[in-house]
Amino acid sequence: MCARACRRCGELYPEDRFKITSRKLSGKVYYKSACNLCVAEEGSATRALRKLHQPPGDASCECCGRPSKLFLDHCHSTGRFRGYLCQQCNVGLGNLGDNVCGLLRAIQYLCKHASPPRGEEVGVQAAARALSALP
């Protein structure tokens, strides 16, 4: 049996300490990147955050404002509660690295390739001005 390193705690464990996420017809097995112990700790921390921070009554995403089913968002390195987001925004932030630098790189990319609507400018400064005008 092979040993794997947990992405959360960094410890080496045998593969049976990691949950299997999928099996391919070829026989290849894919595992979660965090060990079972870390996954359990993260789950109990998330449940505790849900008890402390009830979802808002208006059921709209704190990021995009769309009414939707909401998911608890928290910092994965500190465990700190951030708010309630729709699944699309929560996954989007995670895919951008869950940090401001990743989000800014995405904004720069979009500004670089944007076709501005008539009468509007494009660029990071224009995006910053547009963000500052939001409620």
Image (tube, rainbow, N blue to C red):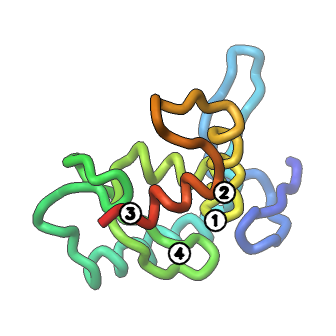
Closer-to-camera residue (94/110): 110
Between marks 2 and 1, how big is the CA–CA gap? Answer: 6 Å
Whether the residues at callouts 2 and 1 have beta carbons within 8 Å, the answer is yes
Left or right: 6 in relation to 61: right
Q: Which residue is mark 1?
A: 100
Q: Residue at x 46, y 60 (%)?
A: 131
Residue kind at label 1, given as amino acid type: Val
Whether the residues at callouts 4 and 1 have beta carbons within 8 Å, the answer is no
Mark earlier in primary sequence (4, 1): 4
Q: Which residue is mark 4?
A: 41
Question: Are there few (<14), some (14-19), or many (20+) residues within 10 Å of tag 4?
Answer: few
Q: Residue 11, which numbered label?
A: none
Mark earlier in primary sequence (3, 4): 4
Whether the residues at callouts 3 and 2 have beta carbons within 8 Å, the answer is no
Q: Which residue is mark 3?
A: 133
Helix, strand, or loop for circle 2?
helix
Q: Residue 104, which numbered label?
A: 2
Q: In this rendering, does residue 17 appear at all?
A: no
Question: Are there few (<14), some (14-19), or many (20+) residues within 10 Å of tag 2?
Answer: few
Quadrant of res 70:
bottom left
Q: In this rendering, does residue 115 appear at all?
A: yes
Q: Residue at x 46, y 29 (%)?
A: 118
